[in-house]
DNA sequence: AAGTTCCA
DNA sequence: CGAA
């Protein structure tokens, strides 16, 4: 597995950064969608507010989460699962807005994954100090579909590891509008986010919102 | 188990 | 709200 990382200094905004064979960073790909995304985000969190999930080990996650789409990812003491019902509201998750779907499909196609039809979008809210430790996305039934991850707001340092938790992870800075796509042979690679530094974004304030699109069923 | 802490 |  090669990790041909460009030096950060060499990156231009529209330059694609190859992480590996089937993983890529699309710099600022989401920028044209942001004006339409933000009002939809507001509506989603009104219906299904951000909450801090608990892992099966009993730990409260520092990242606050909500979801949209036919299925949403949740965790509690019993384990991880996808559910059609938001356990907090008792109702279905908010529908996936068209602009979310359009962005996810366009990014997937740009990365070489045509026909991506996500049925779940996990929405993570990071504040300074918040992190997400190294993990695999393996609760989905279809590993043929890629993962599409959209970064909004303040920067974060993304960790992209290997197929073993102990594999050394590449560090990739992610900024507002960046989209990471991974699938194929890289679909189950460990990934995470280092604790966020204090920062301010003109549109989103002192927070980072991450949209992660998956085909769960 | 998507977390925390300790140790070499 | 249980033991992977």
Image (cartoon, coloured by chain):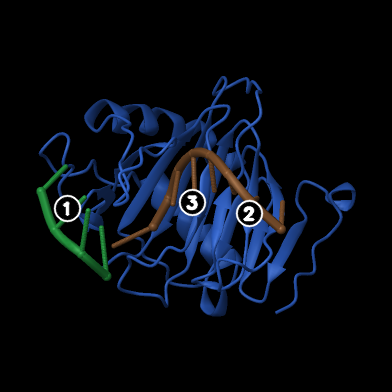
Chain colours: A blue, B brown, C green
Work out which quarter of the rendered image holds the C terminus of chain A and state it: bottom left
- Distance in Å between CA atoms under marks 1 and 3: 22 Å
* Label 3 environment density (alpha carbons within 10 Å; few <14, some 14–19, many ≥20): many
Badge 3 marks a residue whose secondary structure is: helix
- Mark 1 or mark 3: which comes first in sequence? 1
For residue A205, above or below residue A187: above
Q: Which residue is mark 3?
A: A103
Binning the other alpha carbons within 10 Å of mark 1 as few (below 14), some (14 to 19) or many (20 upward) gives some
**Kind of element beneath mark 2:** strand
Q: Which mark lies nearer to you, 1 or 2?
A: 2
Residue A121 makes an appearance in the image: yes
Q: Nearer the viewer, residue A68 or A132?
A: A132
Residue under numbered circle 2: A159
Q: Quadrant of residue A169?
A: bottom right
Whether labels 1 and 2 belong to a single chain: the reply is yes
Kindly identify the residue that appears in the image at 42 percent across and 78 percent down.
Answer: A144
Chain at tag 3: A
Q: Nearer the viewer, mark 1 or mark 3?
A: 1
Q: Chain of mark 1?
A: A
Looking at the image, is mark 3 or mark 2 earlier in the sequence? 3
Q: Are marks 1 and 3 on the same chain?
A: yes
Q: Is residue A75 left or right of residue A102?
A: left
* Residue B1 spot, x, y in % from top left: 39, 57
Who is closer to the viewer here, A80 or A201? A80
Are the residues flagged by discs 1 and 3 in contact, CB closer than 8 Å? no
SS at mark 1?
Answer: loop
Measured Cα–Cα span from mark 1 to mark 2: 29 Å
Q: Which residue is mark 1?
A: A84
Q: Which corner quadrant holds the N terminus of chain A?
A: bottom right
**Residue A54 percent coordinates (x, y):** 30, 42
Residue A33 numbered tag:
none
- Residue at image position (28%, 29%) is A49
């Amino acid at each position: 597995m090669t990790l041909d990382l460009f030096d950060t200094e060499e990156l231009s905004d529209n330059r694609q950064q190859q992480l590996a064979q089937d993983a890529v960073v699309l710099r600022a790909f989401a920028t044209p969608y942001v004006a339409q995304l933000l009002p939809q985000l507001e509506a989603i969190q009104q219906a299904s507010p951000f909450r801090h999930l608990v892992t099966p080990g009993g730990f409260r996650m520092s990242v606050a989460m909500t979801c949209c789409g036919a299925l949403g990812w949740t965790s509690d003491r019993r384990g991880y699962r996808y559910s059609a019902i938001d356990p907090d509201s008792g109702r279905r998750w908010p529908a996936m807005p068209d602009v979310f779907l359009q962005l996810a499909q366009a990014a997937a196609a740009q990365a070489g994954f045509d026909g991506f039809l996500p049925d779940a979008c996990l929405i993570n809210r990071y504040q300074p100090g918040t992190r997400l430790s190294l993990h695999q996305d393996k609760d989905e039934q279809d590993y043929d579909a890629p993962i599409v991850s959209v970064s909004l707001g303040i920067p974060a340092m993304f960790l992209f590891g290997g197929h073993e938790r102990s594999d050394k992870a590449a560090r990739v800075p992610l900024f507002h509008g960046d989209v990471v796509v991974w699938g194929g042979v890289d679909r189950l690679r460990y990934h995470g986010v280092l604790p966020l530094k204090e920062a301010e974004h003109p549109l989103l304030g002192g927070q980072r919102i991450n949209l992660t699109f998956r085909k769960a069923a």
